[in-house]
Image (tube, rainbow, N blue to C red):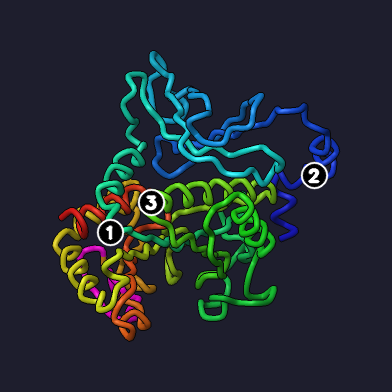
Amino acid sequence: MAQTLVESANAHINKNILEKFMELPMPDGVIQATYIWIDGTDENVRCKDRTLNYIPTSPNELPIWNYDGSSTYQADGSNSDVYLYPVRIYKDPFRRGNNILVLCETYRFDKTPTESNKRKECLETCNKCADEEPWFGIEQEYTLLDVDGRPLGWPRNGFPGPQGPYYCGVGANKVTARDIVEAHYRACLYAGVKICGTNAEVMPAQWEYQVGPCVGIEIGDDLWVSRFLLHRIAEEFGVVATLDPKPMEGDWNGAGAHTNVSTKTMREDNGIVEIQKAIKKLSQHHDRHIRAYDPRGGKDNERRLTGKHETSSIHDFSAGVANRGSSIRIPRGVSDDGKGYFEDRRPSSNCDPYSVVNAILNTICLE
């Protein structure tokens, strides 16, 4: 870790100096709002700040803003303004007080959604399925990297020992940078993100946190804000958090965003029948889902979904009880209870959750 911090410019900054200014009192009724949006890569977030002279209680009270879309892969320089439409408000764990984070949708000059605005269509789909009260939980895996792209804590001129002792590990020889994980967990809780757990993952320097259960569109909102918080907190430590689904080639686990799905009928007695029906529908649209499950239409998942390292093959659909090598896993407890949820293990770690939710609901609820 010491070697990493020397190489990171951010790690040289004395944070105690910042605290002197952050403790300055704010003028009455004035707050800072950080607008957050998804850029043209469909996997990275951007942000910028503004001052408000009032404390909003809903997104509708916030001003529509704009930014230079030609610098975010979303517009040409000759017509570069892209609009930010506020859709969710979260508490700001960095500035605290009444300051806020604002999740936004992005719209072109003609008020049509940008290519990366998958939320609008997803919300329309969720509204059509409201009677089924769809619940989602997403297991977000990620990897912490040194500023040179090497997994944090890995030897400079070699590799760590084989996978085995790292999953849910404890000890300096098994896990790295738990400080970042703890800071992120607490920041999500403070902000209002429905984070429900975290653990060290199978590859050293790889971690996971879980968001949910959330109803409908809320899962996409909370996951995107949780990702913003992850990147922002890692920045404070001079570390890079990557959502690359296969950051290290070879005999190492990749990173996914396993998506747990439950509808009202699945949660009722004998809901396992409805789960089996949903799995059958999913089996008939495997290719369409693969295209929706990573930003590059399946190209990223090709590196991860190999049939090895607790994954299914990207080319074949499969399902099973407690089988982590299948496309769809029915948890053992769900099978025993005869109701509950299923887990779609195909989405990549860098997926757009709005695209995932939209694809799943269209298949299992709207056919």
Of the two numbered discs 2 and 1 in the rendering, the one whose residue sits closer to the viewer: 1
User: How far apart in space, not on screen, are marks 2 and 1 (Cα)?
Assistant: 48 Å
Is the Cβ of the residue at disc 3 closer than 8 Å to that at disc 1?
Answer: no
Q: How many marks?
A: 3
Q: Quadrant of the C terminus?
A: bottom left
Label 3 sits on what residue type? Pro
Of the two numbered discs 3 and 1 in the rendering, the one whose residue sits closer to the viewer: 1
* Residue behind mark 3: 353
Measuring from the top left, give residue 64's x and y in whole percent. 48, 24
Label 2 sits on what residue type? Lys
Nearer to me, 104 or 287? 104
Label 1 sits on what residue type? Glu
Q: Residue at x 38, y 15 (%)?
A: 79
Q: Which residues are magenta?
A: 314-329
* Residue behind mark 2: 15
Q: Residue at x 63, y 61 (%)?
A: 181
Q: Is residue 298 in view?
A: no
Q: Earlier in the sequence, mark 2 or mark 1?
A: 2
Is residue 111 left or right of 291 when viewed as pictured? right
Q: Residue at x 85, y 38 (%)?
A: 20
Q: Secondary structure at mark 1?
A: helix
Q: Earlier in the sequence, mark 3 or mark 2?
A: 2
Nearer to me, 267 or 277? 267
* Residue behind mark 1: 132
Q: Earlier in the sequence, mark 3 or mark 1?
A: 1
Q: Secondary structure at mark 3?
A: helix
Is residue 244 left or right of 19 when viewed as pictured? left
